[in-house]
Image: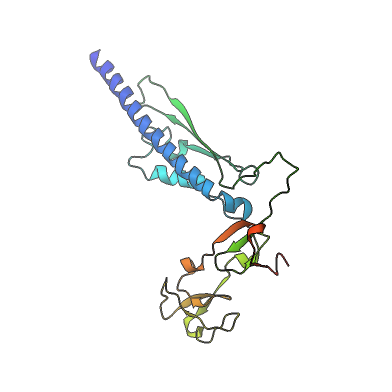
Amino acid sequence: MVFPLFLFFMATVLLSIEGVRFQSNVQEALHQAGNKSSVMGFEVKYMDGKKNDAIGQIREYLGGQMVPYLCADNGAEGIYIQDLSRIEDNGQIEIKVTYKLRPFVRFLPIGELQVQDRFLGHAWTGYCENPGNTDQTQEVYVYITKSGMKYHVQHNCTYLRVQTRAVNYDEIDSARNESGGKYDACRRCWPAKGGLVYITSDGSSYHGRSDCSALKRTVYMIPLCEAEGYGTCSKCAG
């Protein structure tokens, strides 16, 4: 009689410890996925950016843990994840994970415990000051780049996006940018002297990688009143 009680007690304790560990892993995965979705929210809502794969990120995190899904009923298949985020509508980010915890020894009368964890947050899309005051003139914002001389009224203006094209290294000496200038080797990625290289029509360097950091264009959103000294974009503001 003593041994079955001892076995029942130990199984209950171990299930509790493992359950807390697994739930902590789920909450950490939710936190990481939710935060990444929040950071990417501005691009999703205003720049037609790609939405974060929160479900895949959570499954990858849980599957990478030591002895994953030990106490989860049906293992990875028993983890039900929902991404209910509405970034385009109201900026809300909501991710739910539902699963059941089961005892290690199936014949013990402990039963299963259904658990639901949730991440609720808001995308980093800024805010509207004095939204209820319709008497005030709404602030107009424009978009600029770090080295550009024009401001843009549309966030998806093609001039704000870096357009790259691949050419053979043998052609780089004869290639010219839109100003008629030649291309020099990028001092960040140091392209090899052969194969394909990447250039832009308004750039002055050729790159060995299409994802070179020098090809990333940082866009700033500023009030129109602070754009003094900038010209207007002929494409989106002309």
Where is residue 104 drawn, in percent x and y? 34, 28
In which quadrant of the rendered image does the N terminus lie? top left
176, 153: nearer the viewer: 153
Up-down relation of residue 75 to residue 146 (above or below): above
Instruction: Work out whether residue 105 can be spotted.
Output: no
Residue drawn at (36%, 35%) of the image: 70
Decide if residue 163 is on the left or right side of residue 137. Answer: left
The image shows residue 7 at horizontal and vertical percentages of 27, 21
81, above or below 202, in the image: above
How many circles with numbers are drawn on the protein? Answer: 0
On the question of residue 106 being in view, the answer is: yes
Reply above or below: 14 against 37.
above
Nearest the eye: 175 or 6: 175
Q: In this orientation, which residue lies closer to the viewer: 227 or 90? A: 227
Residue located 48% across and 85% down the image = 170
The answer to whether 12 appears left or right of 227 in the picture is left
Residue at 41 percent across and 33 percent down: it is: 23
The picture quadrant where one finds residue 32 is top left
- The quarter of the picture where the C terminus appears is bottom right
